[in-house]
Image (cartoon, rainbow, N blue to C red):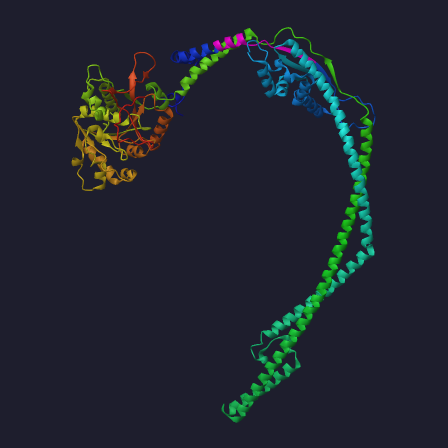
């Protein structure tokens, strides 16, 4: 099992003291986030508490019984005031809670006491509210008084009690008391009025239903009587129909059998109709025919006699000819007899088919009669059931009408007022001490949350510790933002060659940082010298070309023989950095087998550093890197130069860097300090590891190291002579030909 301490990507186990130290470090780093949020919440708590209106709460109680008093024994009420059973009781009391807070009850109170025109109901009598009487009337006219009152009613209904406590909060204690008592009375009256209204409506509806049910009962009785007189549904009639069906079925089966025999006879005779030789026919009907037997006997005798004559005479002898003519005559007679037998068989077949058709028609009629009889019986049963049903409904509704008339004269209510509301003396809000305690706790939590949120939302790459902890790969160094010293002349460095800052300023912080990175790279592979590398990044505009150029300058100064290769075959830019031509280069070598690499590489203004430009841009750049000639190019470059550096497009845009990583000694990943997201960098590292690439390490670009604070913070970029160098990429992630890649203002 792998030791967690040896896994750089494993989460460290923090003890309480380390957590406390991390918290202090976070507060120190994000102190102003914490302080501003803390003070803002405390100030808001004080202001809200100071100006919060005093609110009073009045409470009254009701008794809601599960059953109304039973006055009439054995007579069911139209409206049951109450509920039965455990679940019925729970549902009933929950419904009463909703009724007490309903718009219907609130509207009843509003209309009874004219609250729609009371300014206090809409808080229009607050001190300092300067409104004319006309403005107040307009506000009250357009306001929802019913909704305002319904929303202020609160109900407390205990599960094991029939007591309901109704409360209303208001800034005026007397008004709150009055409102509660009005709501209690309105609910009590509504409960009884509901029963009255329902009983009246039920009685009216039941009278109409009784009348309709009586008419339906009479109609169904008449319909049954008429149907009985129109149809013979006796058992004798049904038995006679069944006997006819049985007899006709037997006759039909015999007719079908005769027809099938005739069809077989016709087919057996018809098979020999065109043969013309009755003496070879095997049909049973013809073989047993007397005439056929006589003809066959005569034919046999003549055939024997012919053979006897042929044994004595020649074929042309008159006696032989005479016998042959007799045989021909016999065949003619046989053919005629065969035709006659076929016609007779067909005539018999037609007779048998006609008989079958007659029996089938009679049987069908018998079935129709039986079906009509069964349908009539079914209709009779339906009419009988309808009559019985109408009689039952009529009896039931008539009885209910009488009960409704009786219960409507007796008024009972299961709701009564237990305690009316009394005048409240002390406000329930605000509670200053509780507000300040909660405000302090909330201020601390909000401050910590603000500091933590600021830290968590900042997912950019910041320093060496973060890179080594999160990614588990080497940190090679950081290249500071290009900045001119006070004594430097900005015009000494051409705008298009700003990426050569380390060459023009060998004593600058940029040059020192590049030499530190060079040392880390060389000592990383002491046993096997580093001969080739790929410099890439996760996304565009992260300082990848500037970093590769700066590293190339440092390696050229050290080895004296270095070449930088522009493998960005979509938007190449290295030739602009060095002010050289891009007419020939990588693609020229790949596409021309006879190309001389010595003529394609170009010396630069940096001693010991050569450039192999991209060459003419191909329509499909991805195929260039997969060409076998590209591997030959890499091998030949290694033989000619001490170090080969490939400037590759970003990994998240195209896969060129992944292909190059398999052909070189390793990959240097460039990250823009405080701009590159850790998620993008993690995805890029994962992609490189998926192709088994050797990750040499990460270089942070555009950093400005501060003597105080946490790690690095990042400056505003290089400016000179009133002009600004910056990265510029198009929307598809490629470079911009119009502006050089340098460190942009972030």
Q: Quadrant of the N terminus?
A: top left
Q: Residue at image x 82%, y 43%?
A: 218
- Rendered location of residue 435, percent (x, y): 54, 9
- Rendered location of residue 93, percent (x, y): 69, 22
Instruction: Indicate yes or no whether the magenta region holds residue 466.
Output: no
Q: Is residue 204 above or below residue 382?
A: above
Residue 94 occupies which quadrant of the picture?
A: top right
- Which segment is the magenta one? 42-60
Q: Give the mark count.
A: 0
Q: Is residue 154 visible?
A: no
The residue nearer to you, when weighing 220 against 287, is 220
Q: Is residue 316 above or below residue 373?
A: below
- Rendered location of residue 193, percent (x, y): 74, 23
Q: Is residue 499 visible?
A: yes
Residue 578 occupies which quadrant of the picture?
A: top left
Q: Quadrant of the C terminus?
A: top left
The residue nearer to you, when weighing 372 against 666, is 372
Instruction: Indicate yes or no whether the magenta region holds residue 56.
Output: yes
**View extreme (bottom): residue:** 318
- Rendered location of residue 151, percent (x, y): 62, 19
Q: Is residue 500 above or below residue 601?
A: above
Q: Is residue 182 above or below residue 386?
A: above
Q: Is residue 212 left or right of residue 53?
A: right
């Amino acid at each position: 099992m792998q030791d967690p301490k040896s896994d750089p990507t494993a989460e460290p186990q923090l003890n309480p003291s380390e957590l406390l130290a991390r918290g202090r470090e976070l507060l120190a780093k994000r102190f102003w986030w914490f302080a501003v949020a803390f003070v803002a919440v405390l100030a808001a708590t004080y202001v809200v508490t100071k100006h919060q209106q005093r609110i009073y709460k009045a409470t009254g109680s009701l008794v809601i019984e599960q059953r109304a008093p039973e006055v009439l024994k054995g007579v069911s009420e139209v409206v049951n005031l109450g509920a039965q059973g455990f679940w019925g009781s729970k549902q009933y009391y929950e419904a009463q809670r909703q009724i007490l807070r309903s718009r219907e009850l609130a509207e009843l109170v509003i209309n009874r006491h004219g609250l729609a025109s009371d300014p206090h109901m809409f808080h229009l009598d607050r001190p300092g509210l300067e409104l004319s009487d006309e403005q107040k009337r307009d506000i009250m006219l357009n306001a929802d008084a019913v909704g305002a009152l319904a929303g202020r009613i609160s109900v407390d209904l205990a599960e094991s009690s029939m007591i309901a406590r109704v409360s209303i909060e208001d800034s005026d204690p007397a008004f709150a008391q009055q409102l509660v008592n009005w709501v209690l009375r309105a609910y009590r009256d509504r409960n009884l009025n509901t029963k009255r209204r329902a009983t009246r409506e039920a009685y009216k509806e039941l009278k109409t239903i009784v009348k309709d049910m009586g008419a339906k009962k009479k109609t169904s009785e008449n319909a049954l009587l008429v149907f009985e007189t129109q149809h013979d549904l006796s058992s004798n009639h049904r038995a006679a129909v069944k006997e006819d069906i049985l007899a006709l079925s037997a006759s039909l089966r015999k007719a079908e059998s005769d027809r099938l025999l005739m069809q077989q006879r016709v087919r057996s005779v018809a098979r020999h109709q065109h043969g013309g030789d009755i003496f070879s026919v095997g049909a049973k009907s013809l073989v047993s025919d007397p005439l056929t037997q006589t003809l066959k006997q005569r034919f046999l005798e003549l055939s024997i006699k012919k053979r006897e004559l042929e044994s004595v005479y020649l074929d042309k002898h008159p006696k032989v000819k005479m016998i042959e003519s007799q045989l021909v005559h016999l065949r003619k007679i046989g053919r005629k007899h065969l035709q006659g037998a076929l016609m007779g068989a067909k005539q018999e077949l037609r007779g048998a088919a006609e008989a079958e058709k007659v029996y089938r028609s009679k049987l069908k009629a018998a079935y129709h009669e039986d079906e009509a009889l069964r349908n009539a019986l079914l209709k009779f049963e339906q009419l009988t059931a309808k009559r019985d049903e109408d009689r039952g409904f009529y009896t039931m509704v008539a009885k209910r009408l009488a009960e409704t008339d009786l219960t409507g004269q007796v008024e009972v209510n299961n709701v009564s007022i237990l305690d009316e509301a009394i005048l409240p003396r002390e406000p329930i809000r605000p509670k200053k001490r509780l507000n300040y305690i909660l405000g302090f706790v909330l201020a601390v939590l909000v401050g910590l949350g603000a500091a933590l949120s600021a830290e968590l939302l900042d997912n950019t790459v910041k320093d060496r510790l973060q890179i080594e902890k999160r990614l588990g790969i080497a940190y090679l160094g950081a290249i500071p933002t290009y900045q001119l010293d006070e004594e430097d002349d900005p015009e000494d460095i051409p705008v298009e060659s700003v990426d050569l800052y380390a060459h023009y300023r060998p004593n600058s912080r940029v040059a020192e940082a590049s030499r530190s990175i060079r040392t880390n790279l060389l000592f990383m592979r002491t046993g096997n010298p580093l001969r080739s590398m790929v410099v890439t990044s996760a996304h565009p505009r992260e300082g990848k070309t500037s970093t590769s150029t700066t590293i190339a300058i440092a390696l050229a100064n050290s080895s004296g023989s270095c070449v930088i290769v522009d493998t960005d075959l979509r938007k190449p830019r290295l030739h602009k950095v060095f002010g050289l031509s891009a007419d020939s280069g990588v693609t020229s070598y790949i596409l021309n087998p006879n190309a001389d690499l010595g003529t394609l590489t170009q010396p630069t203004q940096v001693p010991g550093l050569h450039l192999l430009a991209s060459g003419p841009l191909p329509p499909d750049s991805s195929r260039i890197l997969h060409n076998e000639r590209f591997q030959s190019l890499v091998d030949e470059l290694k033989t000619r130069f001490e170090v080969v550096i490939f400037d590759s497009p970003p990994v998240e845009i195209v896969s060129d860097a992944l292909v190059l990583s398999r052909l070189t000694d390793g990959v240097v990943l460039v990250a823009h300090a405080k701009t590159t997201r850790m998620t993008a960098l993690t995805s890029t590292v994962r992609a490189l590891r998926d192709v088994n690439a050797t990750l040499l390490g990460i270089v942070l670009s555009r950093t400005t190291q501060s003597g105080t604070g946490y790690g690095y913070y990042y400056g505003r970029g290089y400016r000179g002579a009133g002009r600004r160098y910056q990265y510029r990429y198009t929307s598809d992630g490629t470079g911009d030909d119009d502006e050089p890649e340098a460190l942009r203002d972030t």
